[in-house]
Amino acid sequence: MQKKYLKWLLLILLFIVVALIVVIHSLTSGDLKISISDLPRLLFKNGDGVDFTIINTIRLPRIILGLAVGGALSLSGVILQGIYRNPLVEPYTLGISGGASIGVALTIVFGLPQLVGTYMLPLSGFLGALVTVFIVYSLSIRSGKIKIQTMLLVGVMVSFIASSFMMFLLSTTSSENIHSIIFWIMGSLDEPNSKLIGTTVIISVSSLLLSYLFVQPLNALRLGEEKARHLGINTDISIKILFVITSLLTGICVSMAGVIGFVGLIIPHLIRLITGSDFRILLISSFITGGSFLVLCDTLARTMLAPNELPIGVLTGMIGGTVFIVVLNRINKKSLID
Amino acid sequence: MDVFFDIQHYTCGYYRKFYINDINFTVKKGSLTGIIGPNGSGKTTLFKGITCELKAKEGRILLNGKEITRMSFRERARNFAIVTQKIEGADIRVEDYVMMGRIPYHSRFQFFETKNDVEIVEKYMEFINISHLRNKLMNELSGGEQQLVSIARALTQEPELLLLDEPTSHLDISHQVQLMNLIQRLNAQLGLTVLMIIHDLNLAGEYCDYLVLLKDGNVFNQGIPEDVLTYKNIEDVYGTVVITKTNPLSGKPLIFPVSERTLKQVQDSRTQNRIE
């Protein structure tokens, strides 16, 4: 048993090292190449050169947001997979991202951001996500049991409805709104408001801490809801609270960085292969690695076709969609879906 | 032997569908009690009632005089350990699976197992003789082994009452007997009270101290196996002709099915005898 904890500790250190490498790579690459040896000076001392400005006001905030959003998406993916006991659910496939994006788009169209201030977009994303979770959840329950397949289908349909509705909004609203909606749908970690970045980091990290209070329910749920109850878990309440946490995370991610699909799918899947299915190690590992993955994707997105910048959702979508198909294939072979 | 698990006028069921009515029986401390009955007689419904998966419509279930629906989930899990037929958690290591039985004893903020937890897990893995499987994944085990791991997990809950739902149903005869012997050992050596649903009447008769026979959602008969497993009761409840004999070694009842053809032959020869 002690050996297990030691292994976990080493794994966490490994993931942190990987994250550091990704962060340093991201800090140094771009239009303006910066050598690694200059980094400490630029990060920890005052300066006023171009490289100092680029590192501290452009690249670093972007990396911090990437870590927070990637971690949050991956965390909500792993939690949802735990609740549904299906490795294919994540905020994007369940339509939660779609719901959150409707919330945000509506807010932009009706000009509400100016009304309530900076926090309006995250809040509307959260509400959109929460409503979607409620719809998907209640539609996929038949006589007290969740039908996984129904739920995946409902989720996909909700995504379609969301994107159609988005088209509707785009075709009826003014051109400046169109610009800000499109800019935002494409997904980007470019966020000038440091207050919002700070809020995202705080919510993301505190959700991780909060999710650790539900590590026992999540672990017990691996045996199914009924067995989890037999092990003394109040499954109804746990699942509801976990849904609210994932909605909050997804809502804020979507409102900050647009719809970024599949991070919550690929990362937990890969991590589970490395760490096993115990949520005590799974949650933190997914969080750290999800963050690194998104930062890596973002670095690629802004350097691959420089000076053009690819929307980050494009990269995660292409990689993630492929992984989705591979996973589905493997599951069908094991016939886990009944 | 005192009464410590008591089901009183218990009625529960599914919405507008099937109900079990006015069930009354008690389980004595340290006993091995079996619930028997044909398919659709309400065994599983009763089991779901006892495990609080279904809400009682009337009546109550008491453990040591305390109503079980008044207990918290955690308190129930410390008192009842439940082994169901379907075993899940394919990608969990055996050792970790058994450790999950300690969850009811962990506080919300406890992320690591204590030394005591580890000792308890070791003790019961040893007792059930599955220590050599500890590093295997659940889906690498045979059905019988999975059943054993599941029972080990139940024992680490250190329950007052062990509930089993048809533990022998998918096993061949040697594994059936091994499992029932194990359950008997748990009962005798650990003093654990066991309540189980059991399909096989001969195993029920051989191993249980007390039987509750269900028919159409009602208790048809209850008592010691010798009194419950009479050919008359079986024929009334199961609607099929059987012969009962006594096991020459244990003195417990044994039930033999009678095929249609044999029955006809017997009847024919009887009529012939009468004519002659």
Image (cartoon, grey):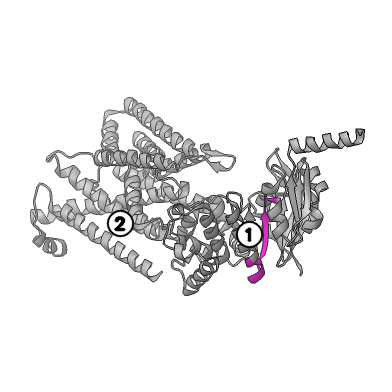
- Residue neighbourhood size for the residue with mark 2, other residues' Cα within 10 Å, grouped as few (<14), some (14–19), many (≥20): many
Residue A115 x, y percent position in the rendering: 36, 42
Q: Amino acid at mark 1?
A: Met
Q: Is residue A265 above or below residue B149?
A: above
Q: Nearer the viewer, mark 1 or mark 2?
A: 1
Question: How many numbered marks have been drawn onto this rendered protein structure?
Answer: 2
- Residue reaching furthest to the front: B276
**From mark 1 to mark 2, how far is it between C-alphas?**
48 Å
Residue indicated by mark 2: A288
Q: Quadrant of residue A100?
A: top left
> In the image, is residue B257 part of the stretch drawn in magenta?
no
Query: What percent of the width, then of the height, locates residue A270?
Result: 32, 50
Tell me where residue A162 sits by quadrant.
Answer: top left
Q: Is residue B259 or residue A203 the one in the foreground?
A: B259
At a point 25% along the width and 54% down the height, the residue shown is A64
Secondary structure under tag 1 reads helix
Chain to which mark 1 belongs: B
